[in-house]
Amino acid sequence: MSIAETTGAAAPEMPGDLLRIRDLRVHFPITSGILQRRSGWVRAVDGVDLSIQPGETLGLVGESGSGKTTIGRAIVRLNEPRTGTIELDGTNLLSLEGRELRARRRDVQMVFQDPYSSLDPRHTVGEILSEPLSVHGLATGSARHDRIAELLTMVGLDPAFIERFPHEFSGGQRQRIGIARALAVEPRLIVADEPVSALDVSVQAQVINLLEHLQDRMGLTYLFIAHDLAVVKHIADRVAVLYLGKVVEIGPVDTLYAHPHHPYTIALLSAVPIPDARLERDRKRIILKGDIPSPANPPSGCRFHTRCWLREKLGNPERCAAEEPALLPRPDRPGLETACHFPEEAAEAARPAAPTVVEPD
Amino acid sequence: MPEAMTETSQPLLSVRDLHVEFVGRNRTVRAVRGLSYEIRAGETLAIVGESGSGKSVSALTLLGLLPPRTSRVPRGSVIFEGQELIGLSTAQLSRIRGARIAMIFQDALSSLNPVLTIERQITEALETHTDLTSSQAHARALELLQLVGIPDAERRLKEYPHQYSGGMRQRAMIAIALSCQPSLLIADEPTTALDVTIQAQILSLIARLRSELGMAVLLITHDLGTVAGLADRIAVMYAGRIVETGPTESVLADPAHPYTSGLLRSLPRLDDPRGMTLRPIEGTPPDLATDLPGCPFAPRCMWREEVCWADDPRLLPVREAESGRSIACHHHPTAEEARAGRSLVPGFRPADPPAAVAEKIAVVVPVEAAS
Ligand SMILES: Nc1ncnc2c1ncn2[C@@H]1O[C@H](COP(=O)(O)OP(=O)(O)OP(=O)(O)O)[C@@H](O)[C@H]1O
Ligand SMILES: Nc1ncnc2c1ncn2[C@@H]1O[C@H](COP(=O)(O)OP(=O)(O)O)[C@@H](O)[C@H]1O
Ligand code: SF4
Ligand code: SF4
Ligand SMILES: [Mg+2]
Ligand SMILES: [Mg+2]
C-alpha cells in the first residue's frame, strides 16, 4: 500500500509517483565584507517540479552550474531548500526529523561523480560497505560478511576484494564500489550524479550496463544526472533539461530528442558531436553565444533570452525579456512540456529541412 | 591547406619509434612504446585514446616539457621543419616552443599566470619571440583577443584569468598560443573540461583559425565525436603506441583494429536507436610498468591467437593499398565481426594465455567460453 494511493493524489489509472518534487527552491547566501553580511542569493534551483515513477529513469541534463547536483543533494537532504516539497511515496521528506528521517533516508541513496574522492582512502572495501549497514542496523553479526560479499558480486567485483583499499582499484572499479555502497541499504531511489562522467569510454559502457542490469533485477528507480546527452538518451526513459535553476523542457526521451521544442534543448542537441565524419559534415550546428549567466542575477523574463538564437531570429520580441514562459504541455507531443513563448517556431527552425540557422563565430 | 599537402614531400612533423619512460624507485613506467606518426603542413591529425595511453606524454616530449629527473627518452626521433628535436638543449627548445609549435591544454586556469593580465601574457610571448615595439605588441594582443572571439576585447585585455569564464580562458590560451603564428598547434584535450555548448564554440574556433592561418593541428582527445568533425586523419593509441591510423571518415565508418571497433561499440551515440545495448570492451588497459611480450591488447581481445601472446604486432597497411589505413594486429576482424564484437568463424576461441602470463595479469574470456 503506497501512501500516494491513500492520499488519493495520483490519477486513477496512473501508477503513483515514487518521487514528486514541487516548487523546489534552493538558494545559497552570498556573503561579503568582514562581517559576512548577506548581500544576495545564488538561486541555484529556482522553482523546479519533477516526478519519477517507480522503476523509471529520469535523466537530468544541463550545463555546468544549472543546478543538477543541487537538486540531487536536496533529495538526499545534503542541502536545505528554501521552499518546496520533496515527496517520496507521498511523504514529504522535508518535514521529517530524527528517527523518521533516518528510516526514510534509507530509501534514497546517492552515487557520486568522482570515484576517487567519494571513498574514504583509509577504509577497506569491507569497512566502506559495512558503514551504511551499521547505520541502518542491517545484516548484523555473521550475516554482515555474506551481505558484503553479495553486494560485491552484484556489481561485478570479486568478493575476495573485501580487504583491499580504494587506491588499489581502477576508476571503474571504484565506481562499482560506490554503487555497491548505495545498494547496501536496498534503496528505492538512486540519485546518480554524473556516475560515469569521469570514466573512460570502455569502462563507462561497463558501468552503464551494470546500472541497467541492476535496475531490471531490483526494480530500482533512478534520477540520472549527466551532461552527456548521448549517455542520457541511452539510459533514461524521460529527460528534464535544466537552465539556470529551472526546467525548460521535459518529456519522454524519444520525443524530446526527436522533436525538441525549446531553443536551448535544440542547441544542446546540435552541439553533441557524433563519431561519424560524413554525418558531422552535413549536420547543422547551432552555436550559442557566450556563457551561462550567473544564477545570482538571472536574466529577466525568459532566463535564456540573453543567448537565445530563436529570439534573435524572430527580431528580439519584447515578450522574451519581459515575461517568464511557463512550462506548458505540447498538445501534439504527449508528455512533452516546454517553457518557451515560441515553441512551434523553435521546432520548425530545428527541422532538418529548414535552412541553417545562425552560426556566430 | 590542400596545396601544401600535395606539393610538400617533407612532412611538417615526423615522429619515429619514440620511447618515453618514467623511472621510479622500484618501477619503470614505459608510457610511450614505439610511437610513429607524421603531420603535413596545414593538416589536422587527431590522436585518440583512453586515459593513460600516453597521449599527453608524447606531446610533452615534443616540446621538451617532461620532468627532467624522472623521465627519459631511450629511443626515437622527432623531426620538425627538418630539425631533430630530441637531444636539443632546453634553450634551443624554448626558441621553437611558442614560436613554431604552440600548445594548449585541458586546464586553462592552471596554465595561465594568475597574477598577470591577459594582455601581459600575450605581449610576453610576443617579446620573447618577435621584435615588435610595445605599442605594436599591444595592437597585436588586441587583434588576437578579437580573433578568438572575446567580446569587448580592449577592456578584457586588462583583466586577470580569474575574471574570465572557463570558455573565455580557453580562448585566451588559444590567443597566446597563436601570438607568434606557429605552424603547428598541439591541443591536448582542449574541450574536455567544457560544457557542450562551449565545446562547440571552441571547436569551431579552432577549425576557423586553422584554415585562416594555415596551421597544422595535433588534436589530442579521448572523444571520438570531436574528432569526426575536425580531423583529417586519426591515430588510435593504446598502451603507448598507435594501433590504428587512417583517414578519419574511413576509420570511424569501418574500424579495422579490435580496439578501435571495441571503442566505437562502447560509445553511446546520439544517433543510436533507443534500447541498443552497449558492448563494452571488458577488462582494463595494461599496467605499463609490467613487461608486455605480445600484443598489449591481447588480454581484452576476442580475436587473439597463439601468436598474439608472443609477438608484438607492427603497424602495417590494411584494406586497399591507397586507403592510407594501417593497423598493428595479427588477426584483425572482418567488418561483420567488428560489428558483432567477436569472431564469426565457427568454433573459434580466443587463445588462452601461456601460464606465465596468466599468473601475472587478468585475462578476459568470452562469456560463452566462461560458462
Ligand atoms: N554550497 C554552495 N554555496 C554557494 N553556491 C553554491 C553551492 N552549491 C552550489 N552552488 C551554486 O549553485 C549553482 C548550481 O550548482 P550545481 O552544483 O547544482 O550545478 P550542476 O548543474 O550540478 O553543475 P555541474 O555540471 O558543474 O556539476 C552554481 O552556480 C553553484 O556555483
Ligand atoms: N610525470 C610522470 N611521472 C610518472 N609517470 C607518468 C608521468 N606522467 C605520465 N605518467 C604515466 O605515463 C602514462 C601515460 O600518461 P599520459 O600521457 O598522461 O596519458 P593520456 O594523456 O593518454 O591520458 C600513464 O601511465 C601515466 O601514469
Ligand atoms: S521565450 Fe523567447 S528567449 Fe526564451 S527560449 Fe523562447 S524564444 Fe528564446
Ligand atoms: S588479434 Fe591479436 S594482435 Fe590483433 S589486437 Fe587482438 S590480440 Fe592484438
Ligand atoms: Mg554537478
Ligand atoms: Mg592526457
Image: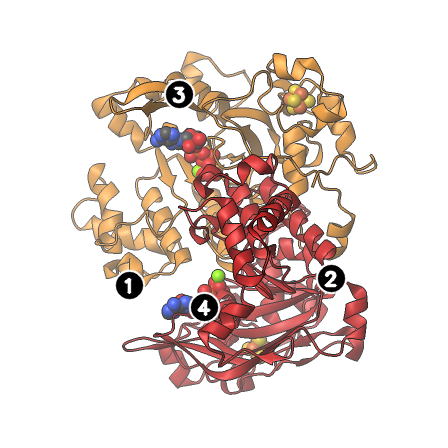
Of tags 1 and 3, which is closer to the observer?
Answer: 3
**Residue drawn at x 62%, y 12% as measured from the top left:** A322
For marks 4 and 2 on the same chain, the one whose residue lies earlier in the sequence: 4
Of tags 4 and 2, which is closer to the observer?
Answer: 4
Q: Is residue B198 above or below residue B14?
A: above
Q: Are marks 2 and 3 in contact (CB under 8 Å)?
A: no
* Amino acid type of the residue tagged 2 in the rendering: Glu
Label 2: state its secondary structure.
Answer: helix
Chain identifier of the residue bearing label 2 in the image: B
**Which chain is rendered orange in the image?**
A
Disc assigned to residue B249 = 2
Chain identifier of the residue bearing label 4 in the image: B
Residue A51 relative to residue A154: left or right: right
- The answer to whether dots 3 and 4 both sit on one chain is no
Disc 2 beta carbon < 8 A from ligand 4? Answer: no
Q: Residues under labels 1 and 4: Cα distance?
A: 42 Å
Of tags 2 and 3, which is closer to the observer?
Answer: 3
Q: Nearer the viewer, residue B135 or A246?
A: B135
Percent coordinates x, y for residue A354 in the rendering: 82, 34
- The answer to whether dots 4 and 2 both sit on one chain is yes
Chain identifier of the residue bearing label 3 in the image: A
**Residue drawn at x 30%, y 49% as measured from the top left:** A119
Q: Which residue is mark 1?
A: A160
Q: Which residue is mark 4?
A: B65
